[in-house]
Structures are given as structure tokens and as C-alpha cells.
Image (cartoon, grey):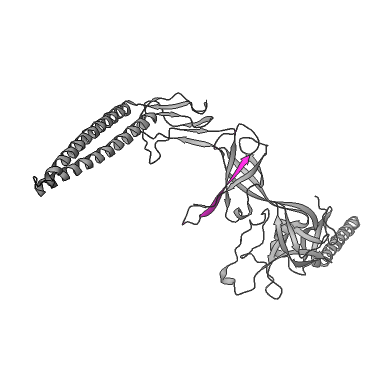
Amino acid sequence: MPASHRPSARRSRGFHRQVLLLSTALIAGASSGCHRDDAVHIQSDTVRRRNLTELVMATGKIQPVTQVKISPEVAGEIIELPVKEGQKVRKGELLVRIRRDLYEAGVRSSEASFKAAEAALLTTRANERKCESELKRNEELFRKKLLSDSGYDEFRTACEIAKANTASATQQIEIARASLKKSEEDLLKTTINSPVDGTVSKLNSEVGERVVGTGMMAGTEIMIVSDLTEMEARVEVGEVDVVLIQPGQKARIEVDSFRDQKFVGSVTQVARSAKTQAAGTQQESTKFEVRIRIQDKQPFLPGMSVTSEIETRYRTNVLTVPIQSVTTRLPKGSSNAPVAAAASGPRFGQPAGKELEVVSAKKADGPKPQEVVFAVENDKATARPVKRGISDDTYYEVLDGLAEGQEIVTGSFRAIARELQDGKSVTTRTNSGWGVSGKAKATE
């Protein structure tokens, strides 16, 4: 080989030697880190004391506290409708007038029948007096044996019939009087006045339309008059949460039409009968109506959509853990695998009472999963059984199982739900990456 090529060959052999050394170092580093990679990466925080307010979320609509549906009690054609939708009305103000020709004729007919009954009563009384006088004369003849028994019986029977006719005529007058009163009432019902002060919130009929109505059942709904100065939210609450709600509890209300505003209210009524939706299907649900009086005065309209948060229970200065920290595991001595199919513990963002209870009756004879929180002790995860109390949107109250200041696992979801086991090594996230001894700084 020429001498000019020897330096180049030495440089090539040196380069290959450096690559080999670097590869050896990388393999050695990977081998030394195998045990660290077996640890589960987590985030952690400490058990702290907080104030908790348990909230029940519900959606519904705004409705007036006082709302009157105007329906006629008589049938006929609308001849006068002096109000419009949205118009304010006063109590006693004219709302609707129905054609009254037929009812005026009915009143006149009833008056004539009443007078005829009075005349009939006068006739029967005159016949009664005549029969009584004839009976007295024939009693003298009967005592003197100048009248036969059969003749006397005829006069006495005729007198009794006359008295009965008088009684019947008296009752006929009462019937005619009642009929006349009914006809007069029907005539008055052709005019409908407002029963309350309020606003015509809905108008369904127009002049010239025919409406139907009787005194025994609701007729055509002509309009709705509402008092819009007092409004309430009518929300539907599930059967699990309704037992926590009582009249007088405070509530915060968000109305879709008033963005970035929250209104204050209080519970006034909790339904005692359920509303079942989609009965007999997989989507069947049972709801109870809860009414919340809105204290703020705003131009609310009936039917606006609302979302309410009802404050049911409150705790002060209690031990708390993040909701996502609570999971389920089988007791020691059974399989340590996470209970995914029968997870009775909470999921991310689920407040108390909202988690799914899916523990099957088929597994009732086996060990039941228990709620645990993983504590961090000497870089290992320790499953601590806990007893929960109330919750808000972020934290659970811990009644038993943990101490204040104790370090616990708060994430990730995969680590808590699947990867962590009792005694498993863990590494905690720090600002610069992953470290065995590092711990995430929690913020309030």
C-alpha cells in the first residue's frame, strides 16, 4: 500500500473503535435502567384538609310560579279577543267574549218555564182548597148516613191527590228556578275576565274560532296568563340524588340565555311521585321534579333552559383526596388484578353517588372489591382501604384509612386503574422529568 494512504487507514480504524465504545456504553446504560423502567410512572399529592360542599346537578326549564290556563266553560264562537301575546293584564280585565245569542235565548226559555211553574202551583193550590171544602160537606152527609162509603172514599182520595199535586208543583218551581240560574250562569260564562295580574304568555286562539268547554272538564285552551315577576326553575333529579334534597336548600342556577351569569335560588318543593321516561326500554329512567324559586329579578321567559347546582351537604376542615385517586381492588389473598368489569369505584370527574355500581350478583359468592387509595411509601405503592364521605366535583371526604399529610397517588388514570398493585415500585414526576425520589408539587 502506498505510504500516502496509511494515515487515512489509521483514522478509519480509530472511528470504528469510537463507535464500538459508544454502542457498548448505550447497551450498558440500558441494562442498568431495566429495573427503573419496571416501576410505574405516577403523579402524587398529599392528603389535605378542605371544606367540601356536595352538589346535585340537574337540568330543566324556567316556569312562572303562578300560571293560569284560560279555558271556556261554554262552547261557542269567539267574537271579542282584546289582548295579544305578551300583553300585561290586570285582575278582572276582559280577556275573551263568546257569542251569547244562544245563551240569552236559554235564559228567556228558563224564565218562561219558571213562570209556568208558578202558575201551575196556583192552580194546584186552588184545586186543593176546592177538594177540602167538598170533603167537609160530604163528611156531614156521611155521618148522617146520606152518603155511601164508596162515595166518601172518592172525595177523600181526590183531596189527597190535590195535596200531592200541590207538593209536586212546588218542586217544579224549584226545578225551574235552578234551570233559570244555570242559564244565567252560562250567559255570564260567555265573558271571561283575567283571574290574576300577569302577562299573556301564550295565545292559542283568534277571533272567529269556535271553542269547546263544559263545567265537567277542561275545554279549549285559549291562552295562558302568567305572573312573570315570580319565576322558578323546574328541574328533574334522578332517584339516587332526590333523597338528599330538602326544601330550603340553596341552589345556583345557570340560564342558557344569560351567559356567564349565575343566579341564586332555594328549593321550594320536591315531588313525591316519579316521572318514568322510556318505560320498558334500555333507556328507562326515573326522575323527580324539584322546584327552585329564583331570587334574582331578570326578564326570564317561560321555557328557558337552566342548569342548577343544589347544595345538599357541607363539611368543614375534613381530610380529602382527589376523586381520581380512589379506585377498587380485590382484598389481599385474592387476585390482585384491577377490578375493571365490576368497578364500583369512581371515575375521573364523577362526584359522590355518580359512579356506576356494576358489581354483578353472579359474583356475590366471591370476594368483593374494596375501595382503596394508593399511598407512596419508600418508593412503593401501598393499597390503603378507605371509607368515603361526601364529595364535590374534585375531592372526596375520607372518613377512615388515611392520615393528614400522607403522600398518595393522584395519576395517571391508567396507573391507578390498571397498573398499580400493592407493593409495586413507582417513580414520581418532577419538573425535570422522572425521578424515584421526586414528587409533583400540588397546587390548591
**Residue 369 appears left or right of 377:** left
In the image, is residue 97 part of the stretch drawn in magenta? no
Q: Position of residue 83 (x, y in %)?
A: 47, 25
Report the magenta residues as a range: 279-303
Q: Position of residue 11 (x, y in %)?
A: 89, 57
Q: Name which quarter of the figure residue 107 lies in.
A: top left
Q: Nearer the viewer, residue 401 or 209?
A: 209
Report the residue that reaches farthest toward the front. 144
Q: Position of residue 356 (x, y in %)?
A: 61, 59
- Residue 412 seen in the current view: no
Q: Nearer the viewer, residue 425 or 224?
A: 224
Identify the residue at horizontal 59%, vertical 63% (top origin): 358
Q: Nearer the viewer, residue 22 or 274?
A: 274
Q: Position of residue 133 (x, y in %)?
A: 18, 38
Q: Quadrant of the N terminus?
A: bottom right
Q: Nearer the viewer, residue 38 or 288?
A: 288
